[in-house]
Structures are given as C-alpha cells and as structure tokens.
C-alpha cells in the first residue's frame, strides 16, 4: 500500500517539473504569440496541449516554418500529467513542449505544429512585429 501511495504521489508531482512558468495553453486551433511579450529573458516559451490517446504516445512537435531570420527550435516534449477514463478506455494527457527562439528582422516569426490523432490543426505562430519598437530580451544590450 505504501508503494502505491508513493507511485500516485510521484505521478501527481510531475507537473512540478514543468519547463517553465512562462507557458501558453494551446487549444485545437492556431494561436498567435508575440515573441517579446511571451518570452522570458532566455527567449524561450513552453506550449501546452491536452490530448486523448489509447496509449502513451506523445504528440510530435515540429517547427515547420521560419521567416525573415527568426529561428525556433523545439528542445523537449514533456508529459505533465495523465489520467485514464476506464469507461472510454482513453488517457487524457497534458503535454508541454519547450521552444527556444532567437529574433529575426521586422515581421519575422516561426510556426510550431503539434501532430497527434486527437489534435486537429493545433499550431502556434511565434512572431515579432517591429524589432526596433520591441527589442528582444536576448539582445537588449545590442541596441
């Protein structure tokens, strides 16, 4: 019984190991996130989704487009929590993807896409409208 309690406590505490408190919850649609406002001082953001699956398969997260010198990279995908619905026989899982970015020119950005059979068009556009008006926290000293 003690081992079961320990396992449940450990599973419940996984969200304590999330990558960042700076995150955006994505719904099943395209989300637009301004890089300067969404970033912390390291130029990173975490994107979170909820999926339903009959197994423990995490979504694939890819940077599909980069424009005007803006660069993004998905560094990790983490399962935050998981619950099982025995009536539907599916897992509901919260997943977080860590994305790091470097700024580009004016009107630059990147497109990050989540691929999973329970998701339909879940994307994040991380963008920068005007670099001079909104300098990136990464390169503040360069201006």
Image: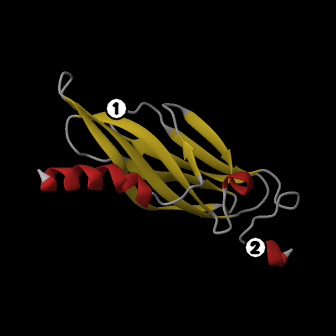
Residue 38 image offset from top left, x and y in percent: 67, 52
Element assignment for label 2: loop
Residue 119 image offset from top left, x and y in percent: 39, 33
> In terms of depth relative to the viewer, which is nearer, 48 or 31?
48
Give the label on residue 91, or none.
none
Looking at marks 2 and 1 on the same chain, the residue that comes earlier in the sequence is marked by: 1
Choose top left, top right, bottom left or bottom right for residue 51.
Answer: top left
Residue 9 image offset from top left, x and y in percent: 28, 52
Q: Which residue is mark 1?
A: 118
Q: Residue at x 83, y 54 (%)?
A: 130
Give the label on residue 139, or none.
2
Q: Residue furthest front?
A: 2
> In terms of depth relative to the viewer, which is nearer, 115 or 12?
12
Q: Is residue 129 above or below residue 90?
A: below
Q: How is the structure coloured here? A: secondary structure
Q: Is residue 47 left or right of residue 35?
A: left
Looking at the image, how many numbered discs can be counted on the residues? Answer: 2
Q: Is residue 97 left or right of residue 3?
A: right
Residue 88 image offset from top left, x and y in percent: 21, 23
Q: Residue at x 87, y 61 (%)?
A: 132
Element assignment for label 1: loop
Q: Residue furthest top?
A: 87
Q: Is residue 133 above or below residue 51?
A: below
- Quadrant of the image containing the C terminus: bottom right
Q: Residues within 10 Å of mark 1 (few under 14, many from 20)?
A: few
Q: CA distance from mark 2 to mark 1?
A: 38 Å
Q: Residue at x 82, y 77 (%)?
A: 142
Q: Residue furthest left?
A: 1
Labels 2 and 1 touching (C-beta < 8 A): no
Q: Residues within 10 Å of mark 2 (few under 14, many from 20)?
A: few
Q: Residue at x 69, y 54 (%)?
A: 35
């Amino acid at each position: 019984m003690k081992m079961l309690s320990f396992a449940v406590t450990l599973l419940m505490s996984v969200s304590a190991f999330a990558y960042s408190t700076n995150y955006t919850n994505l719904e099943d649609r395209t989300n637009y996130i301004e890089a300067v406002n969404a970033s912390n001082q390291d130029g990173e953001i975490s994107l979170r989704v909820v999926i339903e699956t009959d197994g423990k398969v995490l979504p694939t997260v890819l940077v599909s487009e980069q424009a005007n010198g803006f660069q993004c990279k998905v560094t990790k995908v983490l399962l935050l929590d998981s619950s099982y619905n025995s009536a539907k026989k599916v897992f509901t899982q919260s997943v977080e993807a860590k994305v790091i970015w470097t700024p580009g020119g004016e009107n630059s950005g990147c497109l990050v896409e989540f691929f999973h059979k329970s998701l339909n068009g879940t994307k994040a556009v991380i963008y920068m409208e005007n670099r001079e008006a909104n300098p990136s926290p990464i390169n503040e000293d360069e201006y």
